[in-house]
Amino acid sequence: MRSSKFGNIQIFIILITAIYLAEFFVMILLKKLSLPISIENFIDGLILVILIYPLLYLLAFRPLMYEIKKCKGLEEALYTSNELDKYLLKTIPFGMDIVDQYGNIMFLNEKLEAIFGKEAIGKKCWMLYKDDKMQCVDCPLREEIKVGKTKTIEAKDVLGGKVFQINHTGMIYQGKKAILEVFQDITERKLVEEKMKEVVELKSEFTSIVSHELRTPLAAIKEGINLVIDGSAGPINKNQEEFLGIAKNNIDRLARLINDVLDFQKLEAGKIEFKMEENNINDIVRDIERQMVSLVSKKGLKLVVNLDNNIPRIKFDKDKITQVLSNLVNNAISFTEKGNITITSVCQGNNIVLGIRDTGIGIKKEDMPKLFQAFKQLISAKQRKIGGTGLGLAICKNIVEAHQGKIWVESEFGNGSVFYFTLPI
Amino acid sequence: MNKKILVVDDEPDILKVITFRLKKINCEIFTAIDGLDALKIAQEIKPDIILLDILLPNMDGREVCLNIKNNPELKNIPIIFMTASAISDTVRIMKECFADDYLIKPFEPEELFEKVKKYIG
């Protein structure tokens, strides 16, 4: 790094020399004007020079020195920046060029120069890069160039069917408004993205066709069995009724599974539209309470509802949140043999927190991480023949997260569980 | 006079069980196994309600529904889509085609009676 060595001592020496030089010129002047070179005149001249110089120093010399110093600093900064630019242009793995406001190329970096050669200068950028030699529809040159502003476009059919992402930044180049273009080849990324999209579409289509095809025969089986069970097709005996009952229960289970798979798949693929409407979550809890009360008392349990009446109305999908609540309460009932199921709502900061507490078997610590994953039904659930699909909590998680909420569980094995979920206000 | 119900489904088994079930409520039942057939029968007999599957050969349920709802003579006939598709899709299709209600297969007999009674009393 170079630095200025123009210190205060040097300035002082220059000043003294200048004063003597000035005095010398005064003497010459006196002589030229044929004035007598007396000691008085000499002293007058000296006083005049001594008085004028500090003024001169303050008004002219010092600002001049300051400007000189500043220029030197700028020169250094420019030198450093030029060096950096040089290496940056050389190392950067993208093609770069600068075009004027008409799209004529004014500069290319080495990467582009290697392809097009120096003769590219002065040609229109789209004539050079685009397969159809047409200006891009969203080309920023179609608007006024704004210095310092960056616009990114994606251009298809560039350099033989490739896709490029081009960053355009408005700048001043050689005194004119210009645009710096940085080219990034995203052909492969686009291909992968497209393939992924196709796969997701295919999976979603496949699931809905399979579900449809499974449900249609199920409907015929179910209705056929129903007609026999309820005696519409003639009297049946107790044993026949019992076994047909088993068949019917398992058809219902299969239908639930198909519904859950379809639901889950659609949530995962983001294919479900949420109807976000302002509602009071407490009303939903009261609906669930009404629906569940008979099921709870049939099992000899008690359903307690503890609601914070001051919670605000918030936007959520009523059907989907009802599904979450009903799922969590159903789980609580399934895993509880005696005691209470308690539903609470409370306002905490920017969230409404809903809790579903049970006095059931609880969850082992090692099982907790599996809980919200699809098809990871716990052995405890299978042993108890709960007949769930292993998708309920995964669906709940998806729905809650789509509402920007969180869902979690607190539990001690043998001592019941509390499932919480939040909805933002 | 007995109410007339038109049941449309391309699955003969489904037609058979639903017809058997609906006979309990003293009504006259007509069936069709494809869309064109359904439209023809609807124009002929002017049913009091139509239970309509969506995926049908020749003319699909959506088109049948739109045809009926755009026909001044038939547009007041309630149409219940009866499908094995997902609920969200069914609700969307129902709104697009101005249908009145839906049943997702497999459904309970109570659901069927409830919906039918809601529209024909």
Image: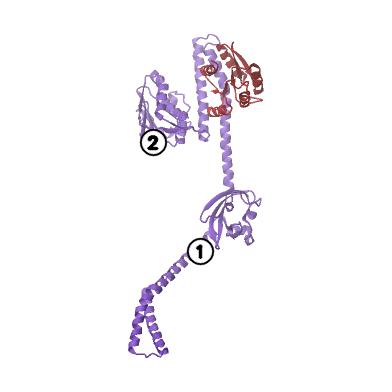
Q: Colour of chain A?
A: purple
Q: On the picture, is A420 further left or further right than A225? A: left
Picture quarter with the C terminus of chain A: top left
Q: Which is nearer the eye, B1 or A136?
A: B1
Q: On the picture, is A194 further left or further right than A403? A: right
* Residue that carries the numbered disc 2 in the rendered image: A351
The chain holding disc 1 is: A
Q: What's the amino acid at mark 2?
A: Asn
Q: Which is nearer the eye, A299 or B86?
A: B86
Element class at badge 2: strand
Q: Image height check: is A131 above or below B49?
A: below
Residue A12 visible somewhere in the drawing: no
* Chain letter matching colour red: B
The image shows residue B41 at horizontal and vertical percentages of 65, 18
Q: Residue at x 50, y 16 (%)?
A: A245
Q: Are marks 2 and 1 in contact (CB under 8 Å)?
A: no
* Residue that carries the numbered disc 1 in the rendered image: A82
The chain holding disc 2 is: A
